[in-house]
Amino acid sequence: MSDAVTKRYARALFEIAEEHGKVKAIDEDLRAVLEAFQDKDAGKIFMHPRLDAEEKKKLIDAFAGKVESEVANFLKVLVDGHREMELPGIVKAFEKMANEAQGIVDAVVTTALPLTKKEKKQLADKFGAALNKEIRIEERVDREVIGGMMVRIGNRVYDGTVAGKLARFKQSLTQVR
């Protein structure tokens, strides 16, 4: 499916979510459903191209009461349109729309050691105040950064790692020669 079609499906669901005031709830449910389908046998069943649509709808009915009705109905629409393989792209596009509407920005923080909850909150608060947005942190641990941290928000990178500083120092030395 093209990116444009994926975005159309996401946009349609987003408009319904906005209309019913359930953007955050539907966003959370979509991510939970996608995670369930990616980690378990349920995903193999739901994504299998040769499985009968009615069997897939029975699987969706198992989510009834656990997710918003709009999510369950949307999944059935995907099944009817033979678009279930596009669920990951649709969820990603929906999440982007939901984040924009809610003023949420995702930040990827890379450090040599795991951050504490307090450190994550402090980072989120500091960058959130600077950007006037709510920051949601995804943490990555990479021992090669040696120390410090790298924060990626959208296409901006704030590199305060020891490895980054050493690389910049090395580059400045080679330019002097």
Image: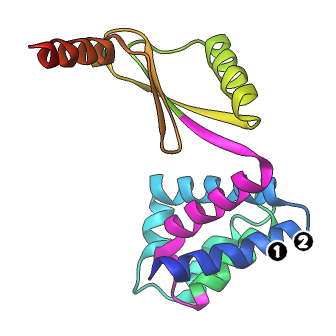
Query: Is 100 above or below relative to 144?
Result: below
Q: Position of residue 50 (x, y in %)?
A: 40, 87
Residue 68 vertical position relative to residue 103 in the rendered view, above or below:
below
Q: Which mark is residue 135?
A: none
Is any part of residue 40 visible from this angle? Answer: no
Residues at circles 1 and 2 in contact by the CB criterion of under 8 Å = yes
Residue 142 can be seen in this image: yes
- Amino acid at the residue labelled 1: Ile
Principal secondary structure, stretch drawn in magenta: helix
Residue matched to label 2: 19
Task: Give the CA separation, mark 1 to mark 2.
Answer: 5 Å
**Percent coordinates x, y for residue 101 in the rendering:** 78, 56
Q: Which residue is mark 1?
A: 16
Residue 117, given in percent of the width and then of the height, sits at 64, 15
Q: How is the image coloured?
A: rainbow
For the residue labelled by badge 2, is the local secondary structure a helix, a strand or a loop? Answer: helix
Residue 176, percent from left and from top: 15, 13
* Image quadrant containing the C terminus: top left
Amino acid type, residue under disc 2 in the picture? Glu
Depth check, front residue: 16 or 160: 160
Q: Give the farthest residue toward the left.
A: 177
Residue depicted at x 74% and y 38%: 133
Give the residues drawn in magenta, as a range: 80-107
Dot 2 alpha-carbon crowd within 10 angstroms: few under 14, some 14 to 19, many 20 or more: few
Along the horizontal axis of the image, is 100 left or right of 92?
A: right
Image quarter of residue 124? top right
Instruction: Tell me what residue is drawn at x 56 percent, y 59 percent.
Output: 34
Q: Residue at x 65, y 64 (%)?
A: 94
Q: Is residue 29 magenta?
A: no
In the image, what residue occupies the spot 46% across and 57% down? 38
- Say which of 28 and 37 sits in front: 28
- The answer to which of 23 and 3 lies nearer the viewer is 3
